[in-house]
Image: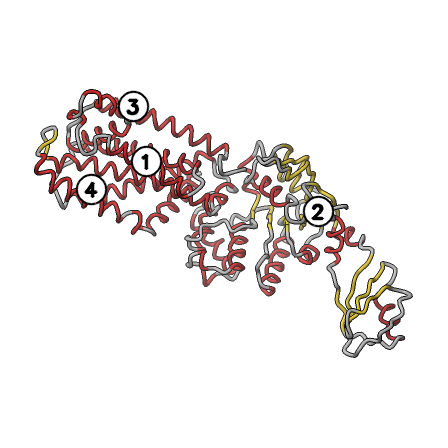
Amino acid sequence: MWVAYKTIVIRDVLRFSRIWVQTIFPPIITTTLYLLIFGGLMGERIGQMQGIDYLQYIIPGIILMTVITNAYSNTVMSFFLSKFNHSIEELLVSPVPYWVILLGYTSGGVVRGFVVGCCVLITTSFFVEFEIDSIGITFVTFLLTAILFSLAGFINAIYAKSFDDVTIVPTFILMPMTYLGGMFYSIDILPEFWQDVSRFNPIYYMVDSFRLGFLGVSTSDFWTSVSVLLIMIIILAIVSFYLLKKGVNIKT
Amino acid sequence: MQVALSIKNLQKTYANQLHALKGIDLQVEKGDFFALLGSNGAGKTTAIGIVCGLLHKTKGSVEILGLDQDTHENEVKRLIGLMPQEFNFNPFEPIEEILINQAGFHGINKSMAKVQSDILLKKMELWDKRLDMAKSLSGGMKRRLMLARALIHQPKILILDEPTAGVDVEIRRSIWAYLKELNSEGMTIILTTHYLEEAESLCRNIAILNEGEVVEQTSMKKLLANVSHQVLILESLSVLPKNITQEKFACERLDDHSLQVVLEADINITDVLQDLSTQGVSVDYVRSAQNRLETLFLCLTAKDN
C-alpha cells in the first residue's frame, strides 16, 4: 500500500511540476502584485492593523489564500483529468484500497500547497522583513487548511462533468469566502453583525490562526480554530471516501 | 481442470434501463486462450468491465481462480491484466512512467518495475519511444503500450479487448506470436476481437454473445465443424466460359475471370477443380470469400437467429 500511495503522490507532483508555468509561477506574480498594490501603495495610507504595519499584516492572508487555491485546484484538476482521459481506470483495476487513492490525491494537493506557499513566502521576503512568531502554529494551520481544501477539491472533481464544473466552485464560492475571511483586514473593524457572520466562514479561522502563527496576533482562540478545521476535515474525508467507494461518476 | 474465470447469472442494467447483460454464464479454464465474440453492443465490454472492477454489476457472481470478486476484490485485481478497447492513459505522461506507475499501483517497487518495463518496452518495440509522451504515439503504438501496461504486474489472466485494432499487419502478427508464447507459459488469455481470423487462429474455446446473452459456448474446433458450407472465389487468368455446368456444386460467374463456388460439407475442393477442368476452366487462384468463423458468427448473431 505504501508503494501505491507513493506512486500516486509522485505522479501528481510530477504532473504539476511539468506545467510549473501554469501551477507555480502565477501565484508568485499575483503575490507580487498584491504586495505592490495593497501593501506598498495603499498600505502606507492605511497605516497599522492590530498594531502591525499593513504590509506585514496581509502577508499571512496572501500566503494562506495561495495555499487554499492551489491545494484545491490541484486535487480537483488532477482527479477530474484522470476521469476525463479515463486514466482513473489504471487505479480502478489495481489492488489499491479506496482510502489510499483518497490519501494519495489529498497529499498531492498538500504538497502543491506547500511548494507554492514556500515560493510565495520567499517572494514576500523581497518586499518586507518578518520573523515567524510560531513555526508550530503556522505549520499546523497550513497543514490542516491544505488537507481541508484538497478534500473539498476531490469532492468537486467527483461531481464535475465538464471543465466548467471545475471552475465554478473556486470562482463563485472559494474566492469570495477567502476575501471575506479577513485576508486583508481584521474582523474587529467590521460592525458587530458582520463580525458574527464572518465567524460562520471557516476560512476566517484558518487566516486568523495562520496570522497568529506568523505575527502573534489573532481575534479568535487557536484551539477553536483547530477544532473547526478538524471537524470539517473529518466530515469531508468521510464524504469523499463514501463517494469514491460508491464510484459516483466513476463507475456506472 | 481449474477454472480461471467463472461467471454465473451475470446481469447488468444501466441507468437508462438498457439490459446490457441478461444473465450470462461463462467458464474459462485455466491456461485457455478464450475468444469472447459478439457484435457491437452485444455486452462484451460490459462483461469485461464488471470482471475487472470498472463497472458495477446488477446481479450475479464472478469468480477468478476460485476467489469471489465481492469478497476478495483486491486479490482478484492482482490476478488480472486488462488491455481495454479505449485508450485510457494520461497522454501527457512519458511511456516508461505509465508502465512504472501501473506497477506501483500493484505494489511493485520502482527498481523491479523498471526491469519489467524494459523487457516489455523492447518486446512491444517501444524502447526508442520510452521517454516520449504517450500522446506522440501512433494508434498502433498506443495499443502496444496498453498491452505492455496490462502485463507489467505479470497477471495470471490477461483480458484483451480488441488488442490489435489499428495495428499494422506485421506488428499484429508479432503480437499474436507473443500472446501465443504467453499462453504456452500458462497465462490464461481472454480475447475479444472484431478480426475473426484472429480469434480462429489464436483461441481454443469460444463464447458468442448476442444482445446480452450467450448464444454459443464451445471449443473452436467443434464450432468450426458446424460450418455446413464454404464460399470460395476461384480466379482464372484466362477468360471463363459463359456456361458452366453446376451439377455437383453451385457456382456463380462474377466476371470474365472469377467464379464464386459454394462448397457443401460433402464435396471437397479437389472434386470441384477436377470438374471445372473437364469443362475447360483452368483455376489459377483460390481464396475464401468469407472466413469460416465469420460465417458462423453471422449465423449465430442474426436477428432472427
Q: Position of residue B23 (x, y in %)?
A: 68, 36
Q: CA distance from mark 2 to mark 4?
A: 64 Å
Q: Residue at position x 88%, y 75% from top?
A: B279
Q: Report which residue position mark 2 lands on.
A: B208
For mark 1, give the secondary structure: helix
Whether residue B112 can be seen here: no
Q: Report which residue position mark 1 lands on.
A: A172
Tell me the kind of residue under disc 4.
Leu
Colour mapping used in the image? secondary structure
Q: Residue at position x 63%, y 32% from top?
A: B59
Judge the density around disc 2: few (<14), some (14-19), many (≥20) Cα neighbours within 10 Å.
many
Q: Is residue A161 left or right of residue B45?
A: left
Q: On screen, A148 above or below B41?
A: above
Residues tagged 3 and 1 counted as in contact (Cβ below 8 A): no
Single out the mark in the foreground, 3 or 1.
Answer: 1
The numbered dot on residue A227 is: 3
Q: Is residue A94 left or right of residue B46?
A: left
The image quadrant where one finds the N terminus of chain B is top right
Tag 2 subunit? B
Labels 1 and 2 within one chain: no
Tell me the kind of residue under disc 3.
Ser
Tag 1 subunit? A
Tell me the kind of residue under disc 1.
Phe
Single out the mark in the foreground, 4 or 1.
Answer: 1
Judge the density around disc 1: few (<14), some (14-19), many (≥20) Cα neighbours within 10 Å.
few
Whether residue B107 can be seen here: yes
Which callout, 4 or 1, points at the residue further toward the start of the chain? 4
Tell me the kind of residue under disc 2.
Ile
Q: Residue at position x 65%, y 39% from top?
A: B21
Task: Report the residue that reaches farthest toward the bottom.
Answer: B238
